[in-house]
Amino acid sequence: FEKSGDLLEDNQVTSVLEEIRVPRRLPDPLGIFRSIFYHWAIVMRSKFDLLVLPHHTQVICLLAFRSFLESSQTGCDPHALIAQVGTGEGKSMIIAALAIYVVVALGKKAHVVVDDETLLERDFWTFKSLFDAFTVPVSN
């Protein structure tokens, strides 16, 4: 039994990234989140040499928040939305993607407040390249 270091060959990874980047149908139900997921995968691949794809919880949560944030434009005005995301399901990525969405798609400012100094430092440097890809200004 020979151990292989890679689960996917480079051409397979490139193929998966292309599937993420290009919508299969229009209008694209993921909208800007498709681009965020693609750039996130590129950032994680360059940083950790891993192919990181969005968790289904992340996708559903972001689509629910998008619907909530856009609902005031349709005349429906819900007052609150809460998402419960389990350990290891990507809360940090959801927050980063949501901040990008608010700034880029809605043209508003986003402030992310974190009460854990370790997570703040980790997430700032992990997501800085993603924010840079969308020219979203950041500071810690």
Image (cartoon, rainbow, N blue to C red):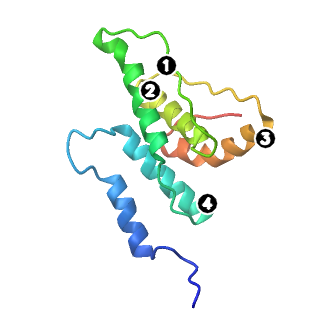
For residue 26, say whether it is visible. yes
Residue at numbered disc 2 = 65
Mark 3 or mark 4, which is nearer to you? Answer: 3
Amino acid at pointer 1: Leu
Q: Earlier in the sequence, mark 2 or mark 4?
A: 4
Residue at point 56%, 37% (across, down): 96
Q: Earlier in the sequence, mark 3 or mark 4?
A: 4
**Between marks 1 and 4 in the image, the one whose residue lies nearer the viewer:** 1
The answer to which of 99 and 25 lies nearer the viewer is: 25
**Residues under labels 2 and 1: Cα distance?**
7 Å
**Front tag of 2 and 1:** 1
Label 1 sits on residue: 81
Give the mark, 1 or 4, whose residue is nearer the N terminus.
Answer: 4
Q: Amino acid at mark 2?
A: Phe
Q: Residues within 10 Å of mark 3 (few under 14, many from 20)?
A: few
Q: Find numbered disc 4 in the image and state the secondary structure of the residue it sits on.
A: helix
